[in-house]
Image: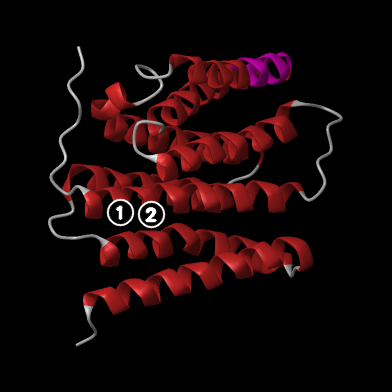
Amino acid sequence: MIPHASLARVALLFFGLLSLAHLVIQVLGPQAWSRPTQVLLMPALALVLVTAARRPRGRLLGLALLALGFSWLGDSAPGLATGDTAFLLMVGFFLVAQVVFVVAFWPHRAESVLRRRRLLLVPYVAYVAALVWICAPHTGGLLVPVLLYGLLLGLMAVLATGMGPWVAAGGALFLVSDSLIALNAFAPGLELPQRDLLVMSTYIAAQTLIVLGLLRRQREAPDREPARSR
């Protein structure tokens, strides 16, 4: 029987190689392999979480697994549709994933920039406000779902600051990754070089940092209780 730690290392190596292969495909092709490798990313990262976590996994890691599941749906479901329907499927499933992350991080909000070092909240608010200001005039009938997703994504990134530096960095990169998608969709004339590579590299890094940060948090303080908040 393979030791638990060895399984975790194998799972992490597989995820790393899969991520590298997907990013190389973004640059060199063949593009026919882009969707299949993308669809495998979140299950592979979930395998890392499952094999590396201590038992019991607890609330935080359980919700992280659920968020990865909805992220996988956000990656895969748009391939079954086209146009606005595909975009709405992506936004819808990732919106639910952000809700799950918000629910996971909310009990620890007293450790975030919502309560501590509140000046650090300013860049997050300014970033989301600027993104909405740029994109809103061109969203048409998608204004409400796009606005709701942007607000939830910003809230998730802010709450992630209370979960340790790795999760905070992951939340910020998630915000950057999805803002690149929004700018491509709703900022006419803006052409980003290697857009797909930028989006996917920041997305993969974001999810990886969140998962590894939560695993690190569990190892360092498995019985840690959230700070009390009013």
The disc at residue 76 is: none
Q: Main secondary structure of the magenta part?
A: helix
Q: Residue at x 42, y 19 (%)?
A: 117
The image quarter containing residue 19 is: bottom right
Q: Is disc 2 surrounded by few (<14), some (14 to 19) or many (20+) residues within 10 Å?
A: some
Give percent across and percent down for residue 193.
Answer: 82, 46
Q: Residue at x 42, y 69 (%)?
A: 12
In front of the other: 220 or 154: 220
In contact (CB < 8 Å): disc 1 and disc 2: yes
Q: How is the image coloured?
A: secondary structure
The image quarter containing residue 7 is: bottom left
Q: Residue at x 49, y 45 (%)?
A: 74
Tell me if 140 is positioned left or right of 59 in this view: right
Q: Is residue 133 magenta?
A: yes
Q: Is residue 21 magenta?
A: no
SS class of the residue under badge 2? Answer: helix
Give percent across and percent down for residue 6.
Answer: 30, 79
Q: Quadrant of the C terminus?
A: top left
Amino acid at pointer 2: Leu
Tell me if 20 is positioned left or right of 153 in this view: right
The image quarter containing residue 30 is: bottom right
- Say whether residue 94 is visible: yes
Name the residue furthest front. 117
Amino acid at pointer 1: Leu
The disc at residue 212 is: 2
**Segment tinted magenta in the rendering:** 129-137
Marks 1/2: CA distance?
Answer: 5 Å
Q: Which residue is mark 1?
A: 215
